[in-house]
Image (spheres, rainbow, N blue to C red):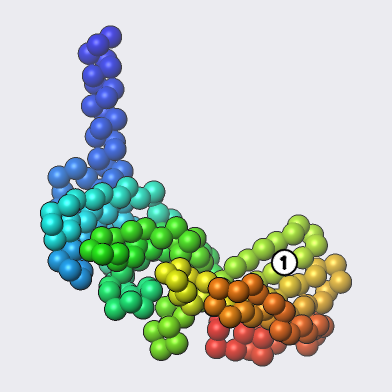
Amino acid sequence: MKLIRLCARGALLILLCVLLGGCDRAPFGEYTLDGGLVCRVWGSSSGIRRLETTAADGTLERFSLKSPDIEPDPQGGVALVDLDFDGHTDLSIKHRQYPDGEARYLCFLWRDGRLVRHEGLSQLRGLTVHPETRTLTAWAYRTVEEEEESRAHLTYVWHEGEPVLIEKIELIHYLEDEIYCRVVWTAAPGEELTMAEEDWIFVEEYDPDQIWGDKE
């Protein structure tokens, strides 16, 4: 029985190594960030399974990532980008690809020579960085079965170290009545959203270019 348990543990360790991208394989990619921070990722072109960072002082940190659901990507979905506009390079990893082409990313922010995962950003769908306006945009969807469905375009700015919502443009489709309602919500950074516009649109008048413009 003891031998069986040892064999089972060994098989489990092997399986974990495979799932995490290999125990002693060379990393899929290695990136040098600000302050001497070195980031290594394990995985393949179909997605990253493990992330490891070494700080300038030698501190080692490891992150285990759930198996992604993405289309093949030559870089494994890894992108170096300044997500919070603080002048330091951050890291994003594509985690899920949706049928409409949008994706969800695991986001890691550079913080005093370390990479720290930001859970809020990692939940956003279609996250896009706009350096020229220092904003982030994303999309949100909601469906109430047989009653309504909505799509919302969200705009964030950084305020006191966190992304805060300053604009929400929502298009609600009331399925039974076959009519749309477009609502624009706005707010100053750190304040609650308030309604700024409301328009009702018949189905035959629906024009996505007028509703979303260059946001699509």
Q: Is mark 1 on a helix, strand or loop?
A: strand
Question: Of all residues shown, which one is farthest toward the top?
Answer: 1
Position of 99 relative to 44 (above/below): below
Instruction: For the N terminus, give its image quadrant.
Output: top left
Q: Position of residue 27 (x, y in %)?
A: 18, 55
- Residue under circle 1? 149
Amino acid on which disc 1 is placed: Glu
Q: Which of 112 and 173 is in front in this view?
A: 112
The x, y position of residue 138, in whole percent, is 52, 73
| Residue 113 horizontal side relative to residue 79, left or right | left
Q: Residues within 10 Å of mark 1 (few under 14, many from 20)?
A: some
Q: Is residue 84 left or right of residue 18?
A: right
Query: Residue placed at 77% from the left, 65% from the top?
Result: 148
Residue 53 relative to residue 90: left or right: left
Image quadrant where residue 209 sits: bottom right
Q: Which residue is drawn at 27% across and 24% down?
A: 9
Position of the C terminus by quadrant: bottom right
When the figure is inspected, residue 109 is found, relative to residue 4, above or below; the finding is: below
The residue lying at 44 percent from left, 61 percent from top is 122
Horizontal and vertical percent position of residue 37: 18, 63
On screen, 15 above or below 208? Answer: above
Q: Which of 48 and 53 is in front in this view?
A: 53
Q: Which residue is drawn at 27% across and 15% down?
A: 4
- Let me know if residue 29 appears in the view: no
